[in-house]
Amino acid sequence: MRLFLAIDLPSPVKSKLAGQLEGLKKEYPYFRWVREKLYHITVQFFGTVENPKELTEKIKEASYDATPFHLYSQGAEIFLRRQIVLHLSFQRSKQLEVLVRKIRDKIGKGDGRRFVPHLTFARYKIPSKQQYLLIKKKARNLDIDIDFSVKELTLFDSVIEEKRPVYKVIKQFRLR
């Protein structure tokens, strides 16, 4: 199983975000756009896991006293890896940062790096410098405004079906 822990956005928020991205999608139809139903904020990627039961117990222990919190979008940005990644940044949440640190420490992946919540909504091959600068400007000028309450974390299995990912819920962890 290829597992990751995430904040799954509520359906109305997913729809609102998709609507706010519609103009950019029309302008850049050749980007690989994340499907609306797959919008999420990755908390921790685990990769291939042989024993998901052990992992779920560790997540449960690390999150036992976590309480719900609210996330607010901050703006769209891009970053380069082996491709351009367009993403939506969120304001810092101390509660989320503490929760992520506890989870990472519990599973042995605590490296001290600060968690920065973001939601990837599109990817594209690395373009020319001129195209890159234009896309960067357009991302910054996007008017995206979403917020929502986080009441649970979801452990997903990422399965590739017909060259596209499908996320299957393994377990949900309710926040108190």
Image (cartoon, rainbow, N blue to C red):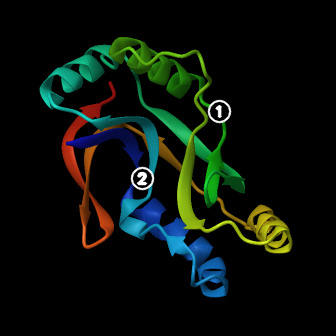
| Left or right of 140, for residue 113 | left
Front-lying residue, 70 or 85: 85
| Left or right of 28, for residue 7 | left
Residue 20 picture location, percent across and down: 61, 72
Tag on residue 9?
Answer: 2
Up the image or down, 80 lies above or below 2; here it is below
Residue 30 picture location, percent across and down: 57, 82
Label 1 vs 2, first from the N-terminus: 2
Rounded to the nearest whole Å, what is the CA distance between mark 1 and mark 2? 17 Å
Tell me the residue that label 1 is attached to. 92
Tag 1 near tag 2, CB within 8 Å: no
Q: Residue at x 33, y 68 (%)?
A: 164
Residue 85 picture location, percent across and down: 61, 58
Q: Quadrant of the C terminus?
A: top left
Q: How many marks?
A: 2
The amino acid marked with disc number 1 is: Arg
Q: Residue at x 69, y 52 (%)?
A: 79
Disc 2 secondary structure class = loop
- The quarter of the picture where residue 25 lies is bottom right
- The quarter of the picture where residue 7 lies is top left
- The quarter of the picture where residue 154 lies is top left
> Are there few (<14), some (14-19), or many (20+) residues within 10 Å of tag 1?
some
Q: Residue at x 42, y 64 (%)?
A: 12
Residue 174 picture location, percent across and down: 28, 32
Tag on residue 131?
Answer: none
